[in-house]
Amino acid sequence: MGIREEMTANLKEAMKSKDNATRDTLRLLNAAIKQIEVDGGKALDEEGVQAVLMKQAKQRRESISEYEKAGRTDLSDPEKIELAIIEKYLPQMLGRDEIEAIAKTVIAEVGADNPKMMGAVMGKLLPRVKEAGPADGKLVSQVVRDLLS
């Protein structure tokens, strides 16, 4: 079963069980997917749907961060709930340890020994990280920064 079919089935289940948070989040995701399809003039494949979900998850993470900086937990809590629902449909992201292992290999290959070489490391690292699986770009950047410092 594809992501969209799973989302549709879960939407129906959320409507039956009166789970408003899941229902509303899934409707927002479906609307975002439909908008991309209308703008592009073609139906999205699984990879395209996944890209939309990744973008939506990133938006939620950024909102949560900003709301927490401002001390607005009343606004960050619903965003956290939405993020948890979105993440159910995304593949497992690479963890810090996995990214660090790949980064150490690339740093050794490039011969990087200071933060000024971060661009060269990132250029070789990002394609390898994509092969290994989805990862948060901010985390990848932070790992490289930490290793080069």
Image: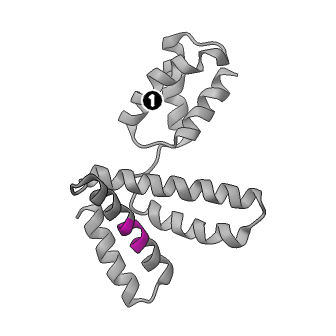
Give coordinates of residue 98: x percent, y percent: 50, 36
Range covered by the magenta-colored residues: 26-31
**Residue visible at 45% across and 29% down in the picture:** 126
Task: Using the image, determine if residue 127 lies above or below residue 94.
Answer: above
**In the displayed structure image, the side of residue 39 where residue 108 appears, left or right:** right
Task: Using the image, determine if residue 111 lies above or below residue 14.
Answer: above
Residue that extends furthest to the right in the rendered view of this protein: 71
Say which quarter of the image contains residue 23. bottom left
Give coordinates of residue 75: x percent, y percent: 67, 70
**Residue visible at 43% across and 33% down in the picture:** 129
- Badge 1 amino acid: Leu
Please name whichever residue, 33 or 68, is drawn nearer the observer in this view of the structure: 33
Give coordinates of residue 20: x percent, y percent: 48, 83
**Residue visible at 35% across and 83% down in the picture:** 13
Quadrant of the drawing holding the C terminus? top right
**Residue visible at 51% across and 24% down in the picture:** 122
Residue named by callout 1? 126
Q: Indicate yes or no whether the magenta region holds residue 126.
A: no
Say which quarter of the image contains residue 65. bottom right
Count of marks overlaid on the render: 1
Give coordinates of residue 105: x percent, y percent: 49, 20
Instruction: Please tell me whether the stretch drawn in magenta is mainly helix, strand or loop.
Output: helix
- Label 1's element? helix
The crowd level at tag 1 (other Cα within 10 Å; few <14, some 14-19, many 20+) is some
Name the image colouring: one colour
Task: Using the image, determine if residue 33 lies above or below residue 125.
Answer: below
Quadrant of the drawing holding the N terminus? bottom left
